[in-house]
Image (cartoon, rainbow, N blue to C red):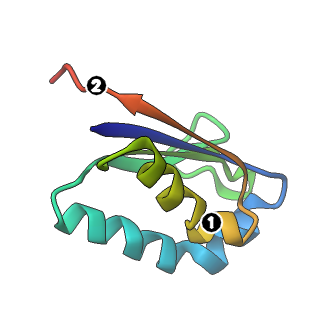
Amino acid sequence: MWYVIEGYDGEDGLAGRATARAAHLDRLRALRDAGRLLLAGPCPAIDAEEPGPAGFSGSLVVVQFESLQEARAWADADPYVHAGVYQRVEVRPFRPVLP
């Protein structure tokens, strides 16, 4: 099943992103290489491709897991969680329709 994982940045998210980004991306690349990643990326806090010091409001990941519990466990182990980037994380089932 596919799942949407949404991480919502806290106030100091930008600084935490800088320190944990490499490990965060390594986990996403592993899912991509296994054919389980549909989409992943950050949400700029302002209407700009590169938000600069405004930073990001969070991130979105659409990924395939065997169960909701497995998706939550993966999300809870994210380096951005441990670095304090995300103030909260939501995980929901997702059913792709288009394209």
State the residue at coordinates (18%, 68%).
Answer: 33
Q: Quadrant of residue 98?
A: top left
**Residue 67 located left or right of residue 96:** right
Of the 4 image quadrants, the one containing the N terminus is top left
**Is residue 91 shown to the viewer in this render?**
yes
Residue that label 1 marks: 80
State the residue at coordinates (82%, 61%).
Answer: 12
State the residue at coordinates (59%, 34%).
Answer: 47
Q: Decide which of tag 2 and tag 1 comes sooner along the chain.
A: 1
Give whichever of 85, 75 is nearer the camera: 75
Q: Residues within 10 Å of mark 1 (few under 14, many from 20)?
A: many
62 is higher (above) or lower (below) than 23: above
84 is higher (above) or lower (below) than 55: below
State the residue at coordinates (36%, 65%).
Answer: 28
Of the 4 image quadrants, the one containing the C terminus is top left
Residue that label 2 marks: 95
Q: Amino acid at mark 2?
A: Arg
Q: Residues within 10 Å of mark 2 (few under 14, many from 20)?
A: few
Q: Residue furthest right?
A: 11
The picture places residue 77, in percent across and down from the top left corner, at 56, 67
The picture places residue 41, in percent across and down from the top left corner, at 44, 50
Q: Are marks 2 and 1 in contact (CB under 8 Å)?
A: no
33 is higher (above) or lower (below) than 52: below
Q: Residue furthest top?
A: 97
